[in-house]
Image (cartoon, rainbow, N blue to C red):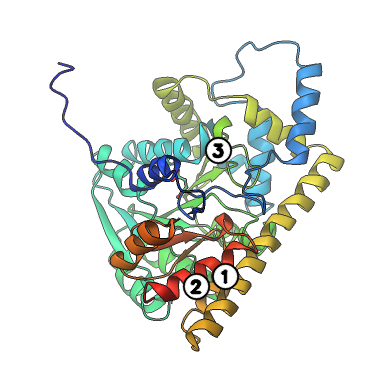
Amino acid sequence: MLTDLTPQPADKILELMQMFREDTRSQKIDLGVGVYKNAQGVTPVMRAVKAAERRLVEEQTTKSYTSLIGDPAYTAALRDLVLGDSVSADRVAVAGTPGGTGALRQGFELARYGEAGTTVWLSSPTWPNHPTIVQYLGIPMRPYRYFDTESRGVDFDGMLSDLKGAKAGDLVLLHGCCHNPTGANLTPEQWGQVADLLEQTGAVPFVDIAYQGFGDGLDEDAYGVRLLASRMPEMIIAASCSKNFGVYRDRAGLLMAITPDAASHGQAQVTLSFLNRQNYSFPPDHGARVVQMILDDDALRADWKAELEDVRLGMLGLRQQLADELRQRTNSDRFDFIAKHRGMFSRTEITPEQVLALREEHGIYMIGDSRMNVAGLNAETVPLLAAAMVAVGA
Ligand code: LMR
């Protein structure tokens, strides 16, 4: 059996991560995988995370199992961080998951227990792991237009027109903020129009929020998810702490399922517990507990927010610097969109040949679809990237 396994396609992002590691050139720049790096190129452990971990080591008296859906204090704290007071807690079923990907997987599995014939609608483009998980689970999927490759903004007319085709009970996957891979995001007004359309069609929003605090701020980035939560009878949300708490490898995520009323909450909660039990039993606790300790402690929370805000402003500064450099070097405003995008990523729409030339001739790694991770830059490497982009004819 093990000699006859069907080969599976490699994940483009992880493949590039490996190529970068194996590149022996001293001057190389990693704009591939979505991991935040500071000016020294380090993905730091955040101050509040270190402090909470120290406290945890001192104070933890047992590592016995928590509940099947994770520590209730964690699920409540993260639910509130994402949803605020947009929806009554007795309508929100929750399950701790291994990272945001775990939450996505459990959310799609949950949908298989609901309406028969559900189709999942995915933005075109989207994070490559979305379609592969949906396909892996054998759920039908359809793309909706999202990105205008000319303006590098949202093709909102195309999006609305495609989503009119979603049926009641279909799932519409939306990026809560900091769209991956494009960096182009909905305005508050557009979120309102998406909510109107979902109300008309009866399709269910599934919001993936993995970068809260990286775009316009913690509350600003939750605007769309909270608006939908306040209006929709049903909704699924996958939240990740990997980026905004920097606990990537600890795998802290949360799946939330909003039910129409408190009465239907029970069955959703039981189903989420069942799914956790089938797939991995108890979710990991370390990262989740650290996140909960930070959110429930005024001083740690304030320090975490301050550091996250520095990270956010740093990325915005790099975006502006790069847009300015490119404006100057190309004598045009065609890269101004980089300063308008939000989050870690910008899809630049440079050609695959130019992406390859950046890698081979300049040691600059971005994803083949032309997505760059702005957080992989610093003030010194921005001019190098701008010069290289011009050199490859971008
Ligand atoms: C990315 O898009 O690069 C990140 O979300 C990391 C990953 O797992 O792909």
Residue 254 bears which disc, if any?
A: 3
Q: Indicate the secondary structure of the residue bearing disc 2.
A: helix
Q: Earlier in the sequence, mark 1 or mark 3?
A: 3
Measure how far apart labels 1 and 2 are at the Cα level.
6 Å
Please give left or right for residue 182 compared with residue 245 in the image.
left
**What amino acid is at disc 1?**
Pro
Q: Indicate the secondary structure of the residue bearing disc 3.
A: strand
Labels 2, 3: front one: 2
Residue 80 is situated, as x and y percent measured from the top left of the image, at 68, 45
**What amino acid is at disc 3?**
Leu
> Label 3 CB, ligand 1: below 8 Å?
no
Please give left or right for residue 160 compared with residue 33 in the image.
left
Report if the CB atoms under discs 2 and 3 are less than 8 Å apart.
Answer: no
Q: On screen, 2 above or below 113? A: above
Which residue bears the numbered disc 1? 383
Q: Nearer the viewer, residue 345 or 257?
A: 345
Report if the CB atoms under discs 1 and 2 are less than 8 Å apart.
Answer: yes
Measure how far apart labels 1 and 3 are at the Cα level.
39 Å
**Residue at 44 percent of width and 20 percent of height:** 277
Residue 144 is situated, as x and y percent measured from the top left of the image, at 31, 65
> Label 2 CB, ligand 1: below 8 Å?
no
